Image (cartoon, rainbow, N blue to C red):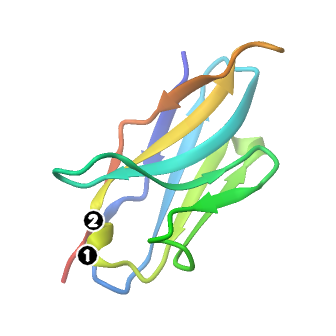
């Protein structure tokens, strides 16, 4: 069974920074794309940033230039560095990873439980 455990959320003032981490564990063959999503109260979950196994990235327009996604394949961990945070970034942030359980197997999408990020003065 795959587990995704997020950490690094919290309360920060506008203009501040936070770094989220998500470690993937379990009996898996490989991890394909990894990403961060967020969901604010009353809104749909949205993609924040994603990164492929080769390191290609894409970002939501609202976070471009402020957030940076990275991954450490040796540690099966994905990170989200968030700078110049705004109140509009307040949400629960979820980690996502597409994994294969065996060579040539299909990709399965897995989610973490989420970590709260609150940007407020």
| Residue carrying label 1 | 87
Q: Give SS at disc 2.
A: loop
- Name the one closer to the observer, 44 or 10: 44
Residue at the image point whose x is 37% and y is 52% from the top: 38
- Pinpoint residue 52: horizontal percent, then vertical percent: 72, 46
- For the C terminus, the quadrant is bottom left
Vertical position of residue 38 compared to residue 62: above or below: above
Residue at the image point whose x is 36% and y is 43% from the top: 114
Residue 85 in the figure: left or right of residue 103: left
Mark 1–mark 2 distance (CA, rounded to whole Å): 6 Å
- Name the one closer to the observer, 79 or 7: 79
Residue 29 in the figure: left or right of residue 36: right
Number of other residues with Cα within 10 Å of mark 2, as a class: few under 14, some 14 to 19, many 20 or more: many
Label 1 close to label 2 by CB (< 8 Å): yes
Residue 75 in the figure: left or right of residue 43: right
Residue at the image point whose x is 50% and y is 63% from the top: 60
How many numbered callouts? 2
- For the N terminus, the quadrant is top right
- Pinpoint residue 63: horizontal percent, then vertical percent: 48, 71
- Pinpoint residue 7: horizontal percent, then vertical percent: 43, 51
| Residue carrying label 2 | 90
Q: Give SS at disc 1.
A: helix
Residue 64 sits in which quadrant?
bottom right
- Pinpoint residue 91: horizontal percent, then vertical percent: 28, 58
Number of other residues with Cα within 10 Å of mark 1, as a class: few under 14, some 14 to 19, many 20 or more: some
Vertical position of residue 92 compared to residue 118: above or below: above
């Amino acid at each position: 069974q795959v587990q995704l455990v997020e950490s690094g959320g919290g309360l920060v003032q506008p203009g501040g920074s936070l770094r989220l981490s998500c470690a993937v564990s379990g009996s898996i063959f490989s991890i394909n794309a990894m990403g961060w999503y967020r969901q604010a109260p009353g809104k749909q979950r949205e993609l924040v940033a994603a990164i492929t196994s080769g390191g290609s990235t894409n970002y939501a327009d609202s976070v471009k230039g402020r957030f940076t996604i990275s991954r450490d394949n040796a540690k099966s961990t994905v990170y989200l560095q968030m700078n110049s945070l705004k109140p509009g970034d307040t949400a629960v942030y979820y980690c996502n990873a597409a994994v294969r359980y065996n060579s040539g197997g299909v990709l399965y999408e897995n989610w973490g439980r989420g970590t709260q990020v609150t940007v407020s003065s």
